[in-house]
């Protein structure tokens, strides 16, 4: 269970790193883009890319770019990942003397569980909100005939326009739903005397429907559930919402009336007068304050021509760049590259008469109960040397190499000056005179007629303590 949590922790670390790269790059480009329609396209692409990172990181579609090697040794020892996950990183060289294999991973594991619990709560809250909207739609009523006639008179390019419902549970017009969107209006707007505010609201919401804003609102909500820890996502979502509102205002103003009429009506709606006080909720709509001032200023005195649609060449270029950036970001990892560790060996493989096998480091934080095989066949004669970490003589005595313990009942188990925490030199030699095992230049076992050895080079611990081996060398 612990190893799976550790794997999930590393997966989340890589995912957060990749999402940070993509979202930060898109946010910087959005800052330098002045056209709202282009910023919306960038935000939508970033949100879709952030969701696509999860399966891409799991599949690792292209070769991983290992960032652990160049940055690892620039960090203090207390910050290095190998101190917390020695079984997940292959060291390039010797490790620091302060490494302890008994380090508990509870800190990162607790952070992982906390992140998963927070995401689960946010997802549950999102599902609860969708259910509440469905309940509101279920309890809503049909509007009056005059309201229906006004709604049908507004041109809409699509064959299936959103539905129109009246609800006493809403305080402002809103477009809700993704598969079957509907416009909810409050009871106060379903009256003949509110003809102009109702027409303004319907024009505004129909633009949202035409631009598929509810779909991307759901995408942004899902991205917020997953990447709630990334501030660039917060800014992208807020900027996309403001741009969507401005584009809806700008296009609705064209069909509302003469120039400036829509902006004046928008200000009238935001005015906290007794007539429209029940309709408006400034905390929900963002009307009033800087958001309303910016929207009205952009409508009345925009310093540049506003594009209704992004150029096709720009859309294709941005899509290609976003796809490439997403693929590259999904391949970046902070994990050290792990060489494959096969558990089986083909007896038919060619074994040269003389050779040398070297292994820089072998780290097992959770060693298996069975002997761990190293993929090298033991020759008839060999000389094996290695540096083995042990915290005490008892821990060292519980280790078995090539099926032989590093101490016997006849061996001297008295602690030596090197019996403290540190690496111990182990040498196993098999020649015509027999098998000899040495630990720190002391003979701990000798077999004149050795029993059969395992087929592969194996290592095992009986104390269930982590194993750390360096500078392993097998000469035959």
Image: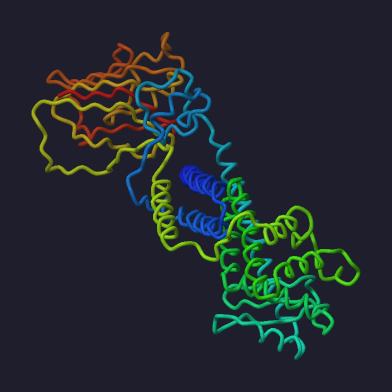
> Where does the image place residue 414, in percent across and percent down from the top left?
42, 12
> Where does the image place residue 95, in percent across and percent down from the top left?
41, 22
Q: Is residue 197 left or right of residue 433?
A: right
In this rendering, the answer to whether 145 lies above or below 432 is: below
Q: Is residue 48 left or right of residue 413?
A: right
Residue at 43% x, 14% y is 419
In this rendering, the answer to whether 106 lies above or below 423 is: below
- For the C terminus, the image quarter is top left
> Where does the image place residue 475, in percent across and percent down from the top left?
18, 23
Residue at 84% x, 64% y is 271
> Where does the image place residue 53, in percent across and percent down from the top left?
46, 53
Q: Nearer the viewer, residue 320 or 360?
A: 320
List the single residue furthest toward the right. Answer: 274
Residue at 84% x, 82% y is 193
The image quadrant that residue 151 belongs to is: bottom right
Marks counted in the figure total: 0
The image quadrant that residue 301 belongs to is: bottom right
């Amino acid at each position: 269970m612990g190893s799976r949590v550790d794997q999930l922790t590393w997966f989340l670390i890589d995912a957060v790193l990749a999402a940070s790269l993509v979202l930060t790059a898109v946010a910087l480009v959005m800052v330098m883009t002045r056209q709202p329609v282009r910023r919306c396209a960038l935000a939508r692409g970033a949100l879709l890319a952030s969701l696509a990172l999860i399966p891409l990181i799991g599949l690792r579609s292209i070769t991983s770019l290992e960032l652990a090697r160049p940055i690892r040794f620039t960090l203090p020892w207390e910050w290095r990942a190998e101190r917390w996950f020695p079984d997940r990183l292959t060291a390039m060289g010797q490790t620091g003397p302060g490494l302890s294999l008994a380090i508990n991973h509870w800190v990162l594991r607790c952070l992982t569980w906390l992140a998963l619990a927070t995401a689960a709560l946010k997802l549950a809250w999102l599902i609860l909100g969708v259910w509440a909207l469905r309940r509101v739609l279920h309890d809503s009523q049909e509007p009056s005939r005059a309201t229906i006639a006004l709604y049908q008179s507004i041109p809409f390019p699509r064959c299936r326009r959103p539905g129109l419902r009246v609800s006493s549970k809403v305080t402002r017009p809103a477009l809700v739903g993704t598969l079957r969107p509907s416009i909810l209006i409050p009871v106060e707007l379903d009256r003949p005397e509110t003809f102009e505010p109702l027409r303004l609201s319907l024009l505004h919401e129909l633009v949202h429907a035409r631009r598929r804003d509810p779909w991307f609102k759901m995408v942004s909500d899902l991205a917020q559930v997953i990447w709630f820890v990334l501030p660039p996502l917060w800014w992208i979502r807020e900027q996309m919402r403001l741009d969507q509102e401005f584009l809806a205002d700008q296009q609705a103003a064209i069909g509302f009336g003469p120039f400036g009429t829509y902006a004046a009506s928008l200000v009238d709606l935001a005015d906290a007068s007794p007539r429209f006080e029940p309709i408006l909720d400034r905390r929900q709509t963002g009307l009033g304050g800087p958001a309303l001032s910016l929207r009205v200023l952009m409508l009345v005195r925009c310093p540049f021509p506003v594009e209704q649609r992004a150029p096709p060449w720009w859309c294709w270029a941005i899509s290609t760049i976003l796809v490439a950036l997403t693929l590259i970001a999904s391949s970046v990892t902070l994990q050290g590259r792990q060489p494959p560790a096969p558990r089986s060996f083909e007896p038919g493989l060619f074994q040269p008469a003389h050779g040398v096998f070297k292994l820089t480091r072998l780290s097992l934080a959770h060693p298996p109960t069975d002997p761990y095989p190293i993929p090298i066949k033991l020759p008839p004669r060999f000389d094996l040397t290695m540096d083995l970490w042990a915290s005490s003589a008892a821990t060292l005595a519980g280790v078995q190499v090539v099926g032989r313990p590093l101490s016997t009942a006849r061996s001297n188990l008295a602690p030596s000056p090197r019996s403290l925490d540190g690496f111990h030199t182990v040498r196993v030699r098999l020649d015509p005179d027999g098998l000899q095992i040495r630990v720190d230049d002391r003979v701990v076992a000798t077999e004149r007629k050795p029993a059969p050895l395992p087929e592969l080079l194996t290592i095992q611990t009986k104390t269930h303590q982590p194993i750390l081996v360096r500078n392993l060398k097998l000469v035959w």
